[in-house]
Image (cartoon, rainbow, N blue to C red):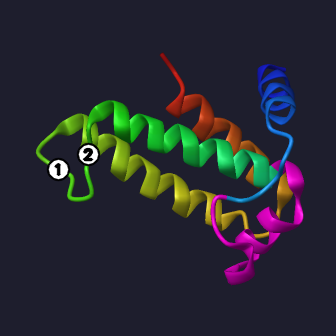
Amino acid sequence: MRFAVLLAALLAAHTAAAASFDCKGAATATEHAICADARLSVLDDHTFKAYTDAVATLGIGDAPDFRNPVADLLLRGHEQWTTVRDRCGADSNCLLAQYLRRIAVLTFH
């Protein structure tokens, strides 16, 4: 239920759907699924923004210092999440669940 409320709020707050990457270069089944589904595209944008906001808040630059355990956790966590997300392939329900989970993690206060 909480995911449904979060999804409704995210979709209402973002009227123009565009993935955080160039859909013209979509190469994988996951990327094609994101580009083909407006709600997944919006969630991709929100995930990208939540991630970049977290990076900025932590002051992580282009060459992060992996001796910082918080930066390491954020960066490695996002890499792991991307791997799990990509295992969804074109399964929109799986992708939806992965995006909602990642946004919840990145925006938790």
Check disc 1 and give the amino acid type.
Phe
Q: Residue 2: which quarter of the image?
A: top right
Q: Residue at x 35, y 50 (%)?
A: 75
Q: Residue at x 45, y 51 (%)?
A: 78
Q: Position of residue 23 (x, y in %)?
A: 73, 73
CA–CA distance between discs 1 and 2?
5 Å
Quarter containing the N terminus? top right
Secondary structure state at the residue bearing disc 1: loop
- How packed mark 2 is, by other alpha carbons closer than 10 Å (few <14, some 14-19, many 20 or more), is some
Q: Residue at x 31, y 41 (%)?
A: 73
Check disc 2 and give the amino acid type.
Asp
Q: Position of residue 79 (x, y in %)?
A: 43, 58
Q: Is residue 31 above or below residue 105?
A: below
- Which residue in the structure is indicated by mark 2? 72
| Residue 98 visible (yes or no) | no
| Residue 10 visible (yes or no) | yes
Q: Are marks 1 and 2 in contact (CB under 8 Å)?
A: yes
Which mark, residue 101? none
- Which residue in the structure is indicated by mark 1? 66
Label 1 vs 2, first from the N-terminus? 1
Can residue 81 be found in the magenta stretch?
Answer: no
Can residue 28 be found in the magenta stretch?
Answer: yes
Q: Would residue 25 appear left or right of 84 to someone viewing this image?
A: right
Q: Is residue 29 above or below residue 46?
A: below
- How packed mark 1 is, by other alpha carbons closer than 10 Å (few <14, some 14-19, many 20 or more), is few
Q: Is residue 73 above or below residue 105?
A: below
Q: Position of residue 63 (x, y in %)?
A: 20, 58
Secondary structure state at the residue bearing disc 2: helix
Q: Would residue 57 appear left or right of 27 to someone viewing this image?
A: left
**Residue extending farthest left:** 67
Q: Which residues are magenta?
A: 20-39
